[in-house]
C-alpha cells in the first residue's frame, strides 16, 4: 500500500465495509415469546421488566433499579428523585444529547453548563465548582462516549457543597472509575437502552440508586405517582408522568443485560487496542482517559491538536477517502445553542418559565461556554470499534488514522 493519501489519488487503506452484526438474536426472541405466550405485556402483571430491573440492579449493586421508556425518561426520573423547586439549578455538561437537558427543564429546574476539558472531552470539575450558586441543587455528570468523568473531583465538590450527583451514563454502560462502575459513584445513575447504545431494547432506560428516599420517590414518579399497593380510593403520592417500560421491551432488555459484560469486554478490548495503535500518533489524539478509568467506547472521540497543520474537517474528509467513516465536531455547538427554544428560554407557551423563577442574568449564548465551543471545533469521531469487529478491522482503522495524520502533516 502506498503512502499517498486516497484523497490525492492513492490507494485507500480499506475498501471493504467494516464488520457489523445484529445486536439481538435468539436469546431476546425466547424472552419475547414468553411475553406473547403469557399475554401480559404491561410491566404490572408481566415478569420481564421486573427481571431486567433485578439483574441490571444486581450488576451495579443497586438497591433500587427503575426501568423506563428512554434514557431521557431515566434522567427525568433521576431529576424527579431530587425534586427541585422551580428556578433551582442543576449543573451539567454542554456536550451531550438534548435528552440530558429536557428533563431538567420539564421539572422546572434550570441547567447551568460547566465547560468541558479539551483532552478528556468531559466536564471540567473546576468549572463545575465555579458555577455553583445558592440555587444549585444537584450536579449531573455526563460520561461522554463512555469515558468516565473525573468522579473523585466531582464527588469532592458535591460533598463540600452538600449536593447530590446524578450520573448520565447513557453512553457509558459498565465504564469504570477506580474499580467502581459509573452510575454507582454518585447518588443516582441513569442509562439509555436506545438502539445505538451498548445494550438496547429499541428504546428504553433505567435509573439506579442506593438512596432509599430517592428509590421510593423514583418508582412512584415513573408510574404517575400512583401507589398501587394501597387499597381503597386511589392515591397519587408524587406528581409524575407515565414512563413505564412495557414487558416486550423488558424481555429484550433482560436478555441484553445478560450479555452486557461480554459486550463491554469485547468493545473495551477493541477500543483499547485502537488507543494503543494511536499512542504516538501525530496531531490527532484519542480522548484522554484518566488514571484508573476504563472506557467503553460508545463513540471514539478524538481531538485534532490546536497546532496541527490541517483542519479537523480536512482530516475527516481524508479519512473517509481511506474507507474509514469519520464525523467532525460531534453535536457542532454546545447543546443549548442547538435548540432554539432552549437558547431563547421560551419553552412553555409565551412564558419564560422556569427562567422567570430563577436567578437574573442566566443566558445561553456564545459567551456561555466558549471553551467548549473550541473543544467541539477540534473534535473528530472516526468509526468506533465495536464488539462485532475482528482485530484486523481495528488495525485498518489505526493504519488509516496514522496515514492521514502523517500524510496531511
Ligand atoms: C448522554 C446522553 N444523555 C441522554 C440521552 C437520551 O437518551 P434517549 O435517546 O434514550 O432518550 C442520550 C441519547 O443519545 C445521550 O447520549
Image: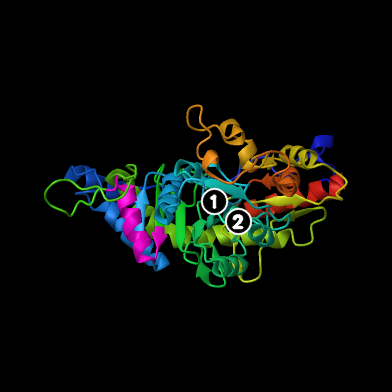
The image quadrant of residue 325 is top right
Q: In the displayed image of the protein, which residue is found farthest to the top?
A: 350
The residue located at (17%, 46%) in the rendering is 234
Which residue position holds label 1? 89
Q: Which residues are magenta?
A: 208-225
The residue located at (64%, 58%) in the rendering is 128
Here the colouring is rainbow
The residue located at (35%, 54%) in the rendering is 218
Q: Which mark is residue 133?
A: 2
The answer to whether residue 387 is above or below residue 239 is below
State the residue in front, 136 or 62. Answer: 136
Q: Judging from the image, what secondary structure is the residue with disc 2 in? A: loop
Instruction: Report how far apart the C-alphas of labels 1 and 2 lie in the structure.
Output: 8 Å
Provide residue 97's location: percent of width, then percent of height: 56, 43
Is 266 on the left or on the right of 81, as rendered?
right
Residue 64 visible in this rendered orientation of the protein: no
Q: How many numbered dots are placed on residues in this image?
A: 2
Residue 158 visible in this rendered orientation of the protein: yes
Query: Is residue 210 found inside the magenta-colored segment of the image?
Result: yes
What secondary structure is the magenta-colored segment mainly?
Answer: helix
The residue located at (85%, 44%) in the rendering is 408
Provide residue 312's location: percent of width, then percent of height: 78, 42
Q: Judging from the image, what secondary structure is the residue with disc 1 in? A: strand
Is 216 on the left or on the right of 321, as rendered?
left
Within 10 Å of the Cα at label 1, are there few (<14), some (14-19), or many (20+) other Cα atoms? many
Is the residue under label 2 in contact with that under label 1 (CB below 8 Å)? yes
Is 1 on the left or on the right of 89, as rendered?
right
Amino acid at each position: 500500500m502506498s503512502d499517498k493519501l486516497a484523497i490525492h489519488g492513492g490507494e485507500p487503506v480499506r475498501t471493504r465495509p467494516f464488520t457489523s452484526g445484529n445486536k439481538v438474536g435468539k436469546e431476546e426472541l425466547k424472552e419475547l415469546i414468553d411475553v406473547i405466550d403469557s399475554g401480559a405485556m404491561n410491566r404490572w402483571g408481566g415478569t420481564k421488566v421486573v427481571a431486567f430491573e433485578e439483574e441490571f440492579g444486581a450488576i451495579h449493586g443497586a438497591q433500587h433499579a427503575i426501568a423506563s421508556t428512554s434514557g431521557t425518561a431515566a434522567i427525568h426520573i433521576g431529576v424527579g428523585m431530587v425534586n427541585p423547586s422551580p428556578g433551582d439549578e442543576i449543573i451539567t455538561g454542554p456536550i451531550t444529547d438534548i435528552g440530558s437537558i429536557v428533563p431538567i427543564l420539564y421539572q422546572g429546574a434550570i441547567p447551568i453548563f460547566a465547560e468541558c476539558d479539551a483532552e478528556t472531552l468531559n466536564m471540567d470539575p473546576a468549572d463545575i465548582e465555579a458555577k455553583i450558586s445558592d440555587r444549585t441543587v444537584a450536579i449531573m455528570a455526563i460520561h461522554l462516549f463512555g469515558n468516565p468523568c473525573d468522579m473523585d473531583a466531582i464527588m469532592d465538590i458535591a460533598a463540600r457543597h452538600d449536593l447530590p450527583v446524578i450520573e448520565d451514563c447513557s453512553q457509558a454502560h459498565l465504564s469504570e472509575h477506580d474499580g467502581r462502575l459509573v452510575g454507582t459513584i454518585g447518588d443516582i445513575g441513569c442509562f439509555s437502552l436506545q438502539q445505538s447504545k451498548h445494550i438496547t431494547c429499541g428504546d428504553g432506560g433505567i435509573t439506579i440508586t442506593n438512596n432509599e428516599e430517592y428509590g421510593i420517590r423514583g418508582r412512584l414518579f415513573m408510574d404517575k405517582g400512583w401507589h398501587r399497593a394501597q387499597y381503597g380510593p386511589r392515591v397519587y403520592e408524587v406528581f409524575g408522568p407515565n414512563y413505564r417500560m412495557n414487558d416486550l421491551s423488558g424481555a429484550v432488555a433482560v436478555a441484553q443485560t445478560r450479555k452486557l459484560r461480554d459486550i463491554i469486554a469485547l468493545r473495551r478490548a477493541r477500543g483499547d487496542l485502537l488507543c494503543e495503535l494511536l499512542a504516538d500518533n501525530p496531531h490527532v489524539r484519542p480522548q484522554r482517559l484518566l488514571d484508573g478509568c476504563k472506557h467503553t467506547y460508545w463513540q471514539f472521540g478524538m481531538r485534532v491538536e490546536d497546532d496541527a497543520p490541517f483542519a479537523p474537517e480536512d482530516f475527516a474528509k481524508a479519512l473517509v477517502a481511506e474507507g474509514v467513516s469519520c464525523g467532525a465536531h460531534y453535536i457542532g455547538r454546545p447543546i443549548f445553542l442547538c435548540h432554539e427554544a432552549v437558547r431563547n428560554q421560551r419553552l412553555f407557551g409565551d412564558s419564560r418559565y422556569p427562567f422567570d423563577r430563577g436567578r437574573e442574568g442566566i443566558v445561553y449564548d456564545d459567551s456561555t461556554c466558549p471553551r467548549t465551543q473550541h473543544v467541539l471545533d477540534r473534535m473528530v469521531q472516526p468509526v468506533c470499534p465495536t464488539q462485532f469487529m475482528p482485530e484486523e478491522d481495528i488495525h485498518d482503522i489505526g493504519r488509516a488514522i496514522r496515514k492521514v495524520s502523517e500524510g496531511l502533516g
